[in-house]
Image: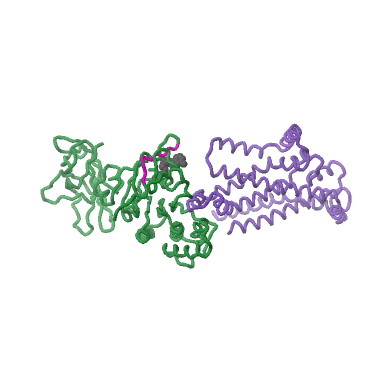
Amino acid sequence: MTSDRTLLGDRLLRSYVIFVIIVFYVPMLAVALASISRSRFFVFPIRRTSWKWYNDTFASLQIKEAALTSITIAFFVAILSVALALAGALAYARYDWKGKRVYQQLLLVPIFFPQSVLGLALQIWFSSIGVQMTWTATVFAHLVWIAPIVTLIIAIQAFGYDASIEEAAMDLGASRWQVFRDITLPLLGPGIFSGFLFAVLLSWGNFPLSYFTSGASVTIPEWLYGKMIGGYTPMVPAVGFLSVIAGAIVLIVGLTINNRLQRR
Amino acid sequence: MASKTILELKQVDKFFGDKAAVERISLEIVEGEFFTIVGPSGSGKTTLIRMLVGMDTPSRGDILLRGERINDVPANKRPTCMVFQSLALFPHMTVGENVAYPLKCRGIEPGARKARAEECLTLAHLPMEYYDRPVTQCSGGERQRVALARALAFDPDILFFDEPLSALDYKLKKLLEKELKDIQRETGKTFIYITHSLEEAMVMSDRIGVMNEGRMVQIGAPREIYRRPNSRFVSEFMGEVNVLPVTAKGGKLHCQSLGTSFEVPPGAQETDGVLIIRPEDMRFVNGEPPVNGVLSGEIFNEYLLGSRVQYQVRAGGTTLLVEKQRDSAAPDPAARITFAPENSMLFAE
Ligand SMILES: Nc1ncnc2c1ncn2[C@@H]1O[C@H](COP(=O)(O)OP(=O)(O)O)[C@@H](O)[C@H]1O
Ligand SMILES: [Mg+2]
């Protein structure tokens, strides 16, 4: 009786999960299909397929430059946000100080801010303090949103082990630097790595913050947007799909490395 | 042997906010002794030891190591070291790397490091093949030994322990207690050990300090503390006892609830308070003229405690505990109980 019911429950749950996965991934499939349609406009069913748009994409200097801009931004955002987040997470997880509560709340707010508003606010702010709108301004804009998220990820790792481990190292004669190098960094390693990964992926896919702050520089999401509102060709879904694939590869490689790190 | 003071505490206080976790503790630890601090959970033992190893600073008072004030010397600049309650092993290192870590910090070259670490493993009764094993694969008892070996590798002047055995099963605990005592004798080091178990303290210590609510309430040899507890708290902390509220009346102590009067214990001042008698000091009366007041009650329960039997006796609304040797004759269920005045302790309330 109960086993019948659990069986039914299991089946329902499984169907639900499959349904959710379909709802999430079918649109991606649509993008993939759109990108291999030979015709300029998307009609379904596809009559003739072609790799033309992919060839065009790889040949396009404009897209190459946008990809390079996106990668450069993601790289700097990841490095800087990990550095900021490491310090922030340790301050939060390892020390007691006045205003820690307020710090926590202030830290979380940017995550929940509507990003277009945040982007606009940053644009106004940057121009009022005389910062040039280029990809460097975008790096800082991304940091405002991404560094708090990375801080959370690293803080969770820091709460995951007992602070007495660091005290014990110091008690055994380690200097502050030795404790950081030999104990803190290796133990936070998986968190730092996930944080880095998150930062790369979030920066790679971000549109609103880049849109408001990058000035003449163009990132991949900006290029997609630009083409979508004027001059659509199936290169748009082609680039979109490639961009998702690139993100997925980073994610899979990253998760594999992370699993190794965790298991050690 | 001339006893030399290695560590001295002078009126040490520690406040968290305006709450005192440690209050006016003065103490002298002698070189080479095994000193145990016992007290119930929350009595301030960890707070005290953290100041002694340099992870916290006293709010007031002084800590002197060989006569030098060390209040503000951080843990990594002190020649002392501690085995944590959580053990605090480095989970990402092997057993050998853990034990060799203090030597690495000191800049000792790898060859000498390994040799010394292996010595310490042996001292802590860990087989050599554990050297390259990850600590995460060690059992509870083995981790215990790794933590001990690591502390020994540091070669501290004083070795501190914060309840390291509390998570182990009884048999292993007993074994490690003995080994710890042996290692202390072998190395001649000063050990300062914290526990909430008086039994553990009794087995290992040269001297015991009993803590309650942040204060050191009694210091003495185990036997002295057992024989002459100086307060109701200490006597109750020693184990199960009978507590009889009494009022002083005409040279005797009257217990209202039981309607019986008792002699004042020899050497004690007649006063209102509580009379405390250990279960093993209670006797069943069979015929012979009693030397003290007699309590009548009814046995309603009995427990086997190893070689002794404990009887629970209901008398006048309270439960009394009486312990006898297991092989002695079974008592009458309608029991008459007494105790010798010299086996009772009187504390004013
Ligand atoms: N960092 C701290 N902040 C505030 N209160 C503390 C802190 N550490 C300990 N205490 C308090 O001090 C008292 C003694 O604690 P502790 O020394 O851990 O006791 P024990 O080790 O004997 O169990 C407890 O009431 C505890 O709540
Ligand atoms: Mg404690």
| Residue at left offset 39%, top offset 41% | B62
Write down the colour of chain B. green
Give the chain coloured purple: A
Residue situated in front as seen by the camera: A217 or A20: A217
Magenta part of the protein: which range?
B8-16
Asked whether the viewer can see residue B231, the reply is yes
Q: x%, y% of residue A170?
A: 50, 50
Q: Is residue B347 left or right of residue B102?
A: left
Q: Dividing the image into 4 quarters, which one contains the C terminus of chain B?
A: top left
**At which x and y percent is residue A220?**
79, 47
Which of the two residues, A199 or B130, is positioned nearer the viewer here? B130
Q: Nearer the viewer, residue B120 or B345?
A: B120
* Main SS, magenta residues: strand
- Residue A232's place in the image compared with B145, above or below, is above
Colour scheme employed for the rendering of this structure? by chain
Q: Quadrant of the N terminus of chain B?
A: bottom left
**Where does residue A27 sit, x and y in percent of width and height?**
76, 49
Check the image and report above or below for B138 versus A12. below
Q: Residue at x 72, y 55 (%)?
A: A249
Residue B136 visible in rendering: no
